[in-house]
Image (spheres, grey):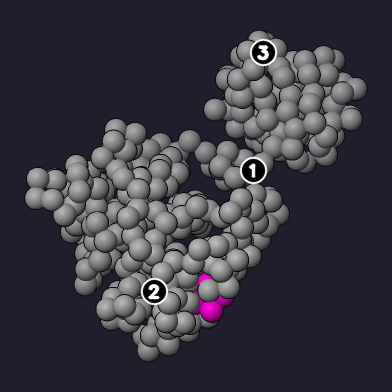
Amino acid sequence: MRKSLKNKKRVVIKIGSQLLEKYNDIDRNFIEDLAYQIKKLKEKGKDVLIVSSGAVLAGIKKLGIDRKPKTITEKQAISAIGQAYLIQLYDKIFSKNNLTIAQILLTTEGLKERKRYVYAKNTIEKLLELNVVPIINENDTVAIEEIVFGDNDFLAAHVSVLANADLLIILSTAGGVYTGDPLKQESKLIEEIKDINEALKYAGSSKSKFGTGGMRSKLEASEIAVSHGIPVVIAPKEKDIILNIIEGKIKGTFIHPQEKKYKGKKSWIALLSEPKGKITIDKGAEKALYEGKSLLPAGIKKVEGYFSKGNVIAIENKEGKIIGKGIVNYSSKELLKVIGKKGEKEAIHRDNLVVF
């Protein structure tokens, strides 16, 4: 499995705030080494995307503040300063290696809307086609607590899925998943993980001065990637680490991919779509859904909420358990007229349906 990483064409690299800090400033040497490695990867015909934290950190350094912002407004203001500073550093250093970068700022709220999700996906594809390195960050300047990704580990996982990546590399100060505190001698590195739920018992949250994640968020985010068949490596901040991982010389923790649960549009429906309403179905319809069939109006017993044709709605069984989501072919008003009736068009086609 590790040797096969040589064949991975599209790689997402996630960089946390802690990795970008050195001697109370931005670590330019790290960015220079990163640019060199990406240049080598692109010479081998690989696509590379970077998900980079650090806007708030860069703003703090630019302003000479020695603490995290205390309010969401302060965070937004400081990140606006820092994002300009950070992307300027990336552009300057990457340009020395004849690499062109592009800045993309995202929020979950934007990706929850199908049209904007597709636009983001198409933009990334076009940038890669133009041989550009997209540098992606959460849009802290406009994000509020309800719509932030929570941590860029999750942003990196969603970007991996969005970009149809073949590999996600999460660089971490811990250098991998350990059985305890990595600073303690008795803690052992877990070199490979097949069951993330089992590994979560070893993971803690962040104690970082500037970061918001921790090993738990890295593992929970990795679950999104591996469920789409994308392997994940959690690796240390070391010279040539990306090149070594691609060569199969992995330091850190390798997380095995799973068989793809969702593909294409179904991935968006499962992970990001926000239901605008809910329907309750009978036992016969529930059985049909688990057999991979479409949902017909005949099996619907109840309609709740107000939604339009093309919205995503939640599907509930008679016991009150949410068993799926899908893009509906009727408005709520239209659906109320046909529930329980046979011979009508599908309420939700199986191609637009996810069953949990």
Around disc 2, counting alpha carbons within 10 Å, would you say few (fewer than 14), some (14 to 19), or many (20 or more)? few
One can see residue 330 in this view = no
The numbered mark at residue 202 is none
Q: Position of residue 319 (x, y in %)?
A: 63, 13
Q: Nearer the viewer, residue 261 or 336?
A: 336
Looking at the rendered image, the disc whose residue lies closer to the viewer, 2 or 3, is 2
User: Is 102 displayed left or right of 110 in the figure?
Assistant: left
In magenta, the rendered stretch is 79-83
Question: Which residue is the extreme one toward the top?
Answer: 283
Residue 175, located in which quarter of the rendered image?
A: bottom left
Question: Compared with residue 247, is residue 2 higher up or lower down, i.e. above or below?
Answer: above
User: Is 307 displayed left or right of 157 in the figure?
Assistant: right
Q: Position of residue 216 (x, y in %)?
A: 35, 45
Q: Is residue 327 magenta?
A: no
Which quarter of the rendering shows the C terminus?
top right
Mark 2 sits on what residue? 66
The numbered mark at residue 318 is 3
Q: Position of residue 8 (x, y in %)?
A: 35, 57
| Mark found first going from the N terminus, 1 or 2 | 2
Q: Residue at x 46, y 55 (%)?
A: 151
Circle 3 SS class: loop
Circle 1 SS class: loop
| Mark found first going from the N terminus, 2 or 3 | 2
**Which residue type carries mark 1?**
Ser
Mark 1 sits on what residue? 273
Q: Nearer the viewer, residue 64 or 156?
A: 64
Q: Is residue 82 magenta?
A: yes
Q: Main secondary structure of the magenta part?
A: helix
Distance between mark 1 and mark 3 Cα atoms: 23 Å
